[in-house]
Image (cartoon, rainbow, N blue to C red):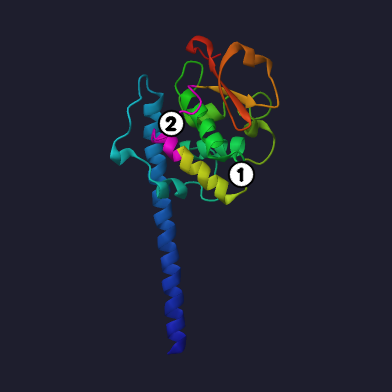
Amino acid sequence: MRHLRVVTCLLIILLAGQATAVDQAQKAKTAESKAGVLEQNSSAKGGKAGPARSEIITDTEAQAVDPIGKEPLDDAITCLSRTIYWEAKDEGTAGMEAIANVIMNRIGHKGFPNTICEVVKQGREEGACQFSWWCDGRSDAAEEDKPYAIAKEIARKALNRQLPDRTGGAMYFHQQKVKPGWSAEYIKTVAIGEHIFYKPQGGAAK
């Protein structure tokens, strides 16, 4: 009888774990679908209106995407979260949000692609690229749970249009310890954390 109870308990635990996994997978799928719509609206000309309540990505849906930071970079939330994480994971919320601002400002702008993943991967993975983490030859997987969870929450807000633009419309940035030649061609907007942000002269990307 005792053996039967043990087996029953183990079976219940197993089924509960499977149900949780299915639920997480469904939430991730829902988040990715919503993100695709929000991304498309962001890239549309004049697409500045906020999303409908049914289109908003929830925090649990966003966290279900790429749960351990090792999934392929093929959806908006993962591409945006990984970029926020790798470019500013040690700079606090303000620095991480500023990176998200730059990516969202680029989407659909003349001179840039129409999707987040294309913006992130613009250029070559080895050599000239827009974001250093993408072409540094190292693993792209997130290494720390808490900063990556924060990055996903910021990505969620950015896609939901719930994130104020800390950068003043910037589409470029560089670390404060360097001074690239291209910075003279743009208008400096703000310095946040370890980065300085710029917007194009006359609004035209180069």
Q: Is residue 187 above or below residue 38?
A: above
Extent of the magenta region: 156-169
Q: Earlier in the sequence, mark 1 or mark 2?
A: 1
In percent of width and height, residue 180 lies at 68, 19
Q: Front-most of 138 and 155?
A: 155
- What residue did someone put label 1 on? 141
> Which quadrant would the C terminus be assigned to in this image?
top right
181 to the left or right of 78 = right
How many other residues sit within 10 Å of disc 2, few (<14), some (14-19) or many (≥20)?
Answer: few
Q: Front-most of 114 and 7?
A: 114
- What residue did someone put label 2 on? 164
Q: Say whether marks 1 and 2 touch (CB < 8 Å).
A: no
Residue at 37 percent across and 39 percent down: it is 34
Residue at 52 percent across and 47 percent down: it is 149
Query: What amino acid is labelled 2 in the image?
Result: Pro
Q: CA distance from mark 1 to mark 2?
A: 27 Å
Please tell me whether the stretch drawn in magenta is mainly helix, strand or loop.
loop
Toward the top, the furthest residue is 202
In percent of width and height, residue 39 lies at 41, 31
**Residue 150, disc:** none
Query: What amino acid is labelled 1 in the image?
Result: Ala
In percent of width and height, residue 152 lies at 49, 43
> Which quadrant would the N terminus be assigned to in this image?
bottom left
Residue at 29 percent across and 39 percent down: it is 53
Residue 133, quarter of picture:
top right
Q: Front-most of 133 and 174?
A: 174
Identify the secondary structure beneath mark 1. loop
